[in-house]
Amino acid sequence: MFKTAKNLLIIIAVLALAFSVVACNGGGSDDGTGPINLGVLLPISGAQAYFGNDMNNAFILAVEQINEAGGLLGREVNLLPVADDGCDPMMAAQAATRITSSDAHFVVGGFCSGATIAALQEFYDNDMIMVISASNSTRITDLNLNQSFMINSPATHQVDKLVDLVHHLGVTDVAVIHQGDDFTQNLSDISNVKLPEANINIVTTQVMEIGAPDVSAIVTAIRHAGADLVFWAGYFADGGNMVRQLRQGGFEGYIVAADGSSSIEFIPATGPAGHGVMVLSTPNAQLAAGGASFDEAFIERFGMSSGSYAAHAYDTIMLLRTAIENAGTTDFEAVRQALQDIEYRGITGLISFTPEREIRYSNFLVLQIWDGEYRLLPGL
Amino acid sequence: MLHNSMTEKQLYANIKSGGENSLFTTYEIIFQQLINGLIQGSFYALVALGFSMVYGIIKLINFAHGDIYMTGAFISFVAFSIIASFSEGVVGVVLAVIASMLLCAAIGFSIQRIAYKPLFDAPRLSLLITAVGVSLILQNTVMVITNGQFMFFHSAIDNMAGVRFGENIGISFLEIAMMLITAVLMIILTLFISKTMWGKAMRAISTDKDACRLMGINVSKVIGLTFMIGSALAAIAGGMAVIYYGQVHFFMGYIIGMKAFTAAVIGGIGSIPGAMVGGLLLGLLEAAGTQLIGSEWKDVFAFGILIAMLIFRPNGIFGKTTIERM
Amino acid sequence: MEKQKSKFIVNSKKLGFFGDVVEKCYVLLDNKKVKWMVFAAILALAILFPLISTNYWISVMQNAMFFMLLALGLNIIVGYTGICNFGFAAHFAIGAYVTAILIRTFEWNFWLTLPISLVASIIVACIVAGPTLRLRSDYLAIVTLGFGEIVRITARNLQITGAASGLSGISRPELFGIHLTTISHWYYVFLALVVLYIIISNRIKNSRFGRALEYIREDEDAAMAMGVNTAKFKLFAFIVGAVMGGLAGSFFTVRMGAISPQSFQFIMSANILLAVVLGGMGKIPGVLIGAAFIAIFPELFRDIPFIGTARMLFFGILLVVVMIKRPQGLWPERRR
């Protein structure tokens, strides 16, 4: 017993010593020469891997274009290998330390909100600015970290668009379905606040677990509640299943899907049942005003068409470049201020930031699946 | 490919005014949710059967079983795509599912031979970990092949057509067919287990493997057959899932595997009728949970009832009281 | 049967290098002095590691140590006592959420939340284990699995737990006047915890309590017949394991600064169980190796093309091979 205690004391002493040695180590800083390194946080494994790879391709394209045009502040821009967050908070925290322990000066990416949230604190602690390409949960805003900028319209903008759409369609009873994860539940919660304010009833809120097959009971519950319109706040694959089952189960009202489903894949996922389904979406390359040339370049470089968030990813890099040029330096505070003051017109629309560092103007559109293709919904 | 019958007019003008007044009567709701629960329960039951059979015979909680279901779905999907080029109708679908059944039976047999057999005398938890390993192998093989993407499928079978009872209640022919197939398979399996020599051998082995070996039963062959039957059943469930849900993904076996495990235990793990009843019961419980307290609490409701039931009936519905060792 | 058994033993003897190494290690470690020296050497390496490594690998190691904590906790339940548990993530979730809620909502000091977290873990363990421990192990497996899901879904649905987004912005605590912010700080905190857990596990194993647990694991009926109060001891073991998991969860919360129900999925419980069984049930070095394996292996292959994306496939193959070659785990308990 005595011996154990003595050994324990020694262990504690040694631990404390080592602890005090590393207690004071600082991160690397930018000396103004060499390439400007961009860390990338994206899911390239797991269910969302497709989006991560697609967005990283857009990053690669943007960086190549910048370097061909002579670089940035006379320096080369260097895209670091993707730190895989796997769309999982624990993996994301690890990926974040991977970025902060590399030579990265700025961070781009961010797809799944839950993963992005878990990583942001680490970037904040290390004075690294992150321009978030796709994650748009208002929980990121709630964190109130002064170095993270969201260029995708947040959920509040999306729900505003939904309210417009519901009024336009002239219905009053809405059912909301989310998938029980951070992003979709956040959207559902905001809907549950904003829709009643606009005199729209939410008759029921349901959850379809990600990948769960049993949907018919939910369909019956929704029909039982008497909804005229179903707002699907989830992702495209389960959305396909849900839309099919809603139609099979005899639901004849409108179906509106959120931007989690706004993927070209949503059309084959829904199949014939998808005809007429509406989708709230931020502009992808195929639909945006200046997207055609980007999409061409993307196809030429990677041999396939870009996905839903490639345009956002491209804008992320170009926005950051503009901010750094405006600041004239890569200094943290100067670039941060430049981003705060920026007015940049990208593929996805005009980007400028509110004091809370959300994108100021909503860029949501309403698409409709029609004869197996997306079309812009006339009148909105 | 498109549903031409669903015109703009239907989608835009056919909105029924709902709101405060529900369109359903209580009986209609109960009836429709009963149908929903039974359909979902059929899937659970088919997968649970394989689970239960394997457990009965080698006392292994076969974690990879959900992934056999996934593999079955994947093979069916590939077979559909190949066969669809010359035979679009029901025949093609049936052929594809049969192909998937055979392949999965072979896969199940090989898994048993390669991964499980060397461990029959090792601690049971080691066998379990091996099963987790096999599950990862199956999942990630399909992931690598499909590049992690979803694959979507639309069969020529019209899932909108069906029988309607009054205004609100409906069941499609496809759903009826699926339930019938499940029922027939279960009856065949029950007869097989209770009437044939093979079935007798299976029951005997589940009671005492060593005694069977002494009695001259080819234990290894019977265990192999059990895996083949279980895997084939899971493959049928997988094939049905492709037709019914229209999508395949490498991760789709995870949830159904967990649910089938639950169903097998509710019924009394190792018991064939138990697995059927357990599967159907779990499907019904989930439908009831969705209707009564909402889909976000559905699984809590189902698991809560399950745990309560196990406390009061510690061997499941059809389970036998046995003494066991880890 | 006899033939099979003997073949099996020959096989495991035949198999080579790793088996021999472990056997040699056993012989070597029988010596108390050698044992302490090895322990001290490994500890010294672990202490020096952050001075020579990048932050990324420090965080990987820290994550591995976190897995070790959970695995050591589960080891008390599964390894020492032989109770099946498929929902260990739930215990870890209880500790994590209690701490998170107390810090976020009630602005407690982190160190003060630990006793509450401990009490909550005990209460929850009693609620789960009390009525169910008499069940057969397969049923216990499903009860614990169900319990794990119930905890996760409840956390996801309630407002106080922050629903699906979980709780974020949890402030990091201070220790000896140092604000624990960098990854190295946490590395040392978790290293200290691992040492503490090892000592606890070791003391339990060599106590009267530990011997009773071993007896129960080997033959519960005989233990009961010999007058061991099996129900009481099993419940105690369950509680001790749950508390170890819960406290690990509390530290996890402040380390991450944010928690969400996603971290407590079934896959997490399965991974912890994997660590325990893979390493060798009931054996502390085995459990540590198992946990390190689970946490580090996927990281090692992350950047290699092709293998990077298929790394879980190789992980699966490796699991099967290891279990076939070493059915008792990498570092099994030696039968006395």
Image (spheres, coloured by chain):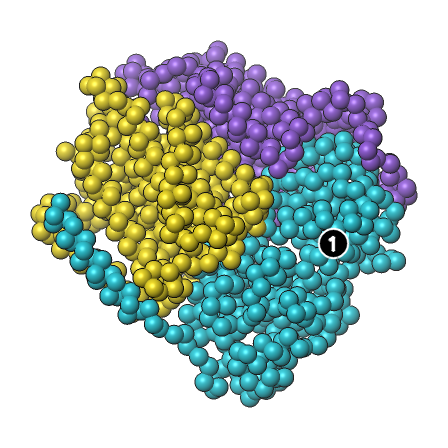
Name of the residue lying farthest toward the bottom: A74
- Identify residue for label 1: A159
Q: Establish if C264 lies above or below A217.
A: below
Q: Nearer the viewer, residue A351 or B275?
A: A351
Q: In the rendered image of this protein, which colour is used for chain C?
A: yellow
Crowding at mark 1 (Cα within 10 Å: few <14, some 14-19, many 20+): many
Tell me if I can see residue B129 in this picture. Answer: no
Q: What SS does tag 1 mark?
A: helix
* Left/right of residue A59 with respect to residue A232 in the rendered view: left
Q: Nearer the viewer, residue B238 or A234?
A: A234
User: Measuring 75% from the left and 22% from the top, which residue is drawn there?
Assistant: B26
Q: In the rendered image of this protein, which colour is used for chain B?
A: purple
Q: In the rendered image of this protein, which colour is used for chain A?
A: cyan
* Left/right of residue C236 with respect to residue A294 in the rendered view: left
Position of residue C263 measured from the top left corner of the image (x, y, whole percent): 48, 48
Q: Establish if A158 lies above or below A17.
A: above
Chain letter belonging to callout 1: A
* Left/right of residue C128 with respect to residue A132 in the rendered view: left
Position of residue C228 measured from the top left corner of the image (x, y, whole percent): 23, 22
Position of residue A47 measured from the top left corner of the image (x, y, whole percent): 56, 51
Quadrant of the rendering where the N terminus of chain A is positioned: top left
Q: Nearer the viewer, residue A253 or A373?
A: A253
Q: Establish if A368 lies above or below C212.
A: below
When asked about the image quadrant of residue C160, the answer is top right
* Left/right of residue B287 with respect to residue C185 in the rendered view: right
User: Measuring 87% from the left and 52% from the top, which residue is drawn there?
Assistant: A168
Q: Nearer the viewer, residue B127 or A330?
A: A330
Tell me if I can see residue A133 in this picture. Answer: yes
